[in-house]
Image: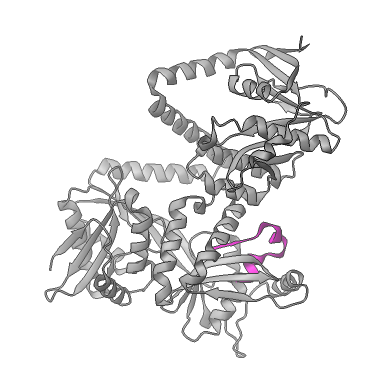
Amino acid sequence: MSILALREIPDDSELRREWDALAFETHSPQVFYTYEWARAVHLAYGESLCPLLLLWRDDDGRLAGVAALAAPKDGPVSFLCATTGDYCDFVVRAKDAAIFTAQVFEKLRQMGYRDIVLTNFPEDSPCYANLDSTTRGFHRYARTAYWCAQLQLAKIVEDSGKPALPRQKMVRRSLRAMGGGAALPTISEATWEKMDTLLPEFFRAHVARFAFTGRISNLARPERREFLLELAKLLGPSGWLCVTRLNAGARTVAWNYGFKFCGTTFWYQPTFANDFEKYSPGVVLLSKLIEEAAQDSSMETVDLGLGAEGYKDAFANASRRTMYVTLHGSRFKQWREMARYRLVAMLKTNPSMEKFAGRIRKAFRSSRERFRSQGAKETIQWAGSRLRRLLWAHDEVFFYEMTNANPGAKSGGLFLKAIDFDTLADAALQNANDEGTMAYLLRCAERLRTNAEGRGYALSNAAGELLHFTWAGPFENFYWSELNSQLPTPVPGALVLFDSWTPVSQRGRGYYGPTLGLVVAKLREEGKRSWGFSASTNTSSVRGLEKAGFRRDFSVFRRRFLWRQKVVQKNAA
């Protein structure tokens, strides 16, 4: 019995049949262990993950073990499905787990791999149980990765046959409120034909929901969206896909991209519409999904997946532990791994220290990226400039009254959209690899979430691309970070345009001026006067304002030495 190593998950119907048959014979069959799952990961992430597939056949040539791994050039070997699967394991029968696990690690040693990270490894897996005896030559460290909440249906079904679930009064109230007294249907789809139109709506809602909570959804990444699309294509024919929606009238207000596999219903990737948050549509959908699973005699478990969200505890009556395992050829690397984990665990007990450590990590990453992209000389000059400004600063900011707005930019196919969470979701989907823009979108989301004064505007074209963003708010009491102070308003009720941003992909195309022109025209229709501003050193911003025809009204000078500063205003000549 030997192991064959492949550098891909091949499009092979016979391998698919053998692999899936073996997956059903494992200790705890999971949809994450199937050929379809590994193939979808390969199609979406293959270039970055570099698949390494180890196939083990018995003396009769029958498939007896599968290890779907990733072996990137600049990182450790890992499970191929580590970033997508709730559970990751070797696909092998329990009786063969020890010998196959030993052969996998021996093969990796022969191939020269000395660093291995296996996360989401189920603690109850026979392969995990045999690590002590199968990882000779490696120094191993294991810690808890997740406690995955589960619901055993047999424990909650009453004599009437109906499940006893928590929060049912709240669920009934929410259903009445959302449906206006009408019953709200849940609709489950399992075929690819339905996914083509359903999933883009789900993607947008998920990204918008994460923006509302101050986070970036993994679905903002095109690779993740491609993965779910490919997975839907592959799982659909087997009937293992189950995308469930909760509808209020003609509108979907909650989704779950999930699965039904080998007696388990999976709550895998849910989301809901932000404007329905007060009705808890996610909890309502989960309750209805559990009710449907309880009525299906083939279902035994509802798996609530990774993550320690509080609502899961209200439903769960069981759990499954997964482990994070590192194996290194060097004992020093093992000790470093242990020290890092214990340091992080210690910092988490002190929120202020954790926050400080986060800022240090962010600053370090930023400096490292600057060093890589600009080189040592520019990095040193930048650091020196930052240090000098901490001690002494001399700044000038130009202010422009926005009087010559030119709404004719509309004739070029450009128009304004209000910035809301759906707009932010569209922007995130278009700029997933632009870190600066993603940080800007989170800043916009914070304003929307806290109902901060001001309105946001985005410039769009007919194709739906979002080209430029800006905000308008009251001039009075506005804090000017460039001047570290507030300024008296030029006229009562004046507005200021601030926090403008152009995504990297759209820069150099002259969208700044048209955006301001359209915004100013809109504000003038409302009887508002507005001002724009720019640091004198920001030549591109100054050029854009003046090219758009805005007149410089006054300048403000700031001189600062250590903690003392002086601000002087001067009218333009």
In the image: residue 294, left or right of residue 448? left
Q: Is residue 564 above or below residue 206?
A: above
Magenta-drawn stretch contains 169: no
Q: Is residue 131 above or below residue 386?
A: below
Q: Position of residue 281 (x, y in %)?
A: 66, 66
Q: Is residue 374 above or below residue 227?
A: above
Magenta-drawn stretch contains 284: yes
- Between 154 and 68, the one nearer to me in the picture: 68
Q: Position of residue 146 (x, y in %)?
A: 45, 59
Report the quarter where the N terminus lies: bottom left
Asked which quadrant contains residue 413, the reply is: top right
In the image: residue 323, left or right of residue 455? left
* Residue positioned 47% across, 46% down in the render: 345
Residue lying at the far right of the rendered structure: 492
Q: Position of residue 369 (x, y in %)?
A: 42, 31
Asked which quadrant contains residue 231, the reply is: bottom left
Asked which quadrant contains residue 415, the reply is: top right
* Residue positioned 20% across, 54% down in the render: 108
Q: Which residues are magenta?
A: 267-285
In the image: residue 442, left or right of residue 319? right
Residue lying at the far bottom of the rendered structure: 159
* Residue positioned 32% across, 43% down in the render: 335
Report the quarter where the C terminus lies: top right
Residue lying at the far top of the rendered structure: 573
- Between 467 and 488, the one nearer to me in the picture: 467
Is there any visible trace of residue 130 in the rendered image? yes
* Residue positioned 45% across, 31% down in the render: 364
